Image: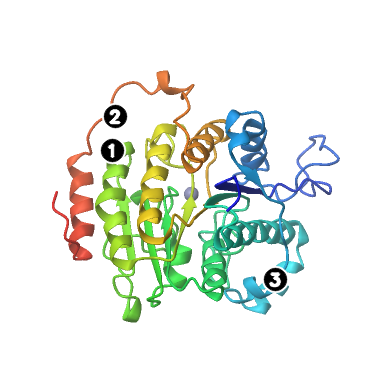
Amino acid sequence: MSDYATGVVVATEVRGPRTKTGSGFLQPSVIAEFDDLWDRPERVAVPVAHLRQADVWSRVRELPIDRAGLAEAVGRIHPQAYVDELARDPIRSDPALDACAAVLTMGRAVARGDVRNGYALVRPAGHHAATSSAGGGGCVFAHSAVLARELQSLGFARVAIVDWDAHHGNGAQGIFWEDESVLTISLHQDREAWVSSDGSVDAVGAGRGSLRNANLPFAPGAGGAAYALAMKSVVAPLCARFVPDVVIVSCGFDGSNVDPAARLQLCAADYFEMTRIVMAIADAACDGRLVILHEGGYAVSYVAICLESVLLALSGGEPAPDRYADRWGEGFAGSPRASDLDLVRASIERHKLDVHL
Ligand SMILES: [Zn+2]
């Protein structure tokens, strides 16, 4: 184990010309490729710029991307025909492959014990991708699934994937629907469940994967108290029963108070608290082995603050002052609503957990 308990891998390649042409706009000659309305290069560039000048950067160890074994790892989830088709569009596929390599780099570092936990700061996201389709949200490869299979190949047989992106983690749910070796849990906003996905509390997996999938679809406005309750009353006991060898988090920040994609009303302190809870889950189950993967999050300046909070938690620090906190007003430290309690109770009941609220 190195002096650094927390690793970070950043995939933010800046190269090549922007190929999309606007209507009369003068395009910069060099800018990060793979750019669309939601998945902007700024999604990673802004948080990285913030973190590199923040105190937290001295607490973590930045790892270079290792591309060894990338094709084999991707091939465990995605058919070659899908990979080949993507390769015809390198503007899209090259950054996606870099992102996947960064995810694998971080996961392997945790598996080897080089670091105790780590964060892969990548784009595009991966949690909507299925085996042969991107699935929307700018996703290309199913990062958490690719990493889960890689970790299993390294001897970590049981993998838990906790997805707190504001959208449903439909990719991992679908890929591992009948798989007893991977526990998939998604906390998301019910009205934002991704197109044609089933993010309902009743979707619990099937066959050998029965009761290996959990969904907590919150109504808009849930807030940190509801999320903390769900983490402690559903995610923690599910993991305690499953006993994973490693925990992966699909970490979107589009549940934040200022994000345009959802209305889940989470703030930086909530992401700190959720990270601490999932660290305790990993400590109890698997010597703290925890790999956090960057997913959505579109209010980029606040994503930077929330991500700083996650890294502070991972590296054993104290919460940073939230420079936006005076804008949140009252209510953010409140109690879960009756509807949130009903949802958590419903999940407890579906999964036959010995938890009483
Ligand atoms: Zn999202």
What's under tag 1, amino acid-wise?
A: Ala
The tag earlier along the polypeptide, 3 or 1, is: 3
Contact flag, marks 2 and 1 (Cβ < 8 Å)? yes
Q: Distance between the residues labelled 2 and 3?
A: 45 Å
Is residue 221 visible in the rendered image? The answer is: no
Q: Distance between the residues labelled 2 and 1?
A: 7 Å
Q: Distance between the residues labelled 3 and 1?
A: 41 Å
Indicate whether 209 appears above or below 291: below
Marker disc for residue 225:
1
Residue at image point 67% right, 39% down: 45
The kind of secondary structure element at disc 1 is helix
Contact flag, marks 3 and 1 (Cβ < 8 Å)? no
Indicate whether 30 appears above or below 250: above
Q: Are there few (<14), some (14-19), or many (20+) residues within 10 Å of tag 2?
A: few
In the visual, does 344 lie left or right of 183?
left
Marker disc for residue 69:
3
Whether the residue under disc 1 has CB within 8 Å of ligand 1: no
List x then y, in percent, for residue 147: 56, 65
Marker disc for residue 88:
none
Total count of labels: 3
Residue at image point 31% right, 49% down: 231
Whether the residue under disc 2 has CB within 8 Å of ligand 1: no
The kind of secondary structure element at disc 2 is loop
The tag earlier along the polypeptide, 2 or 1, is: 1
What's under tag 3, amino acid-wise?
A: Gly
Q: Are there few (<14), some (14-19), or many (20+) residues within 10 Å of tag 1?
A: many
Marker disc for residue 333:
2
Query: Viewer-proximal residue, 297 or 150?
Result: 150
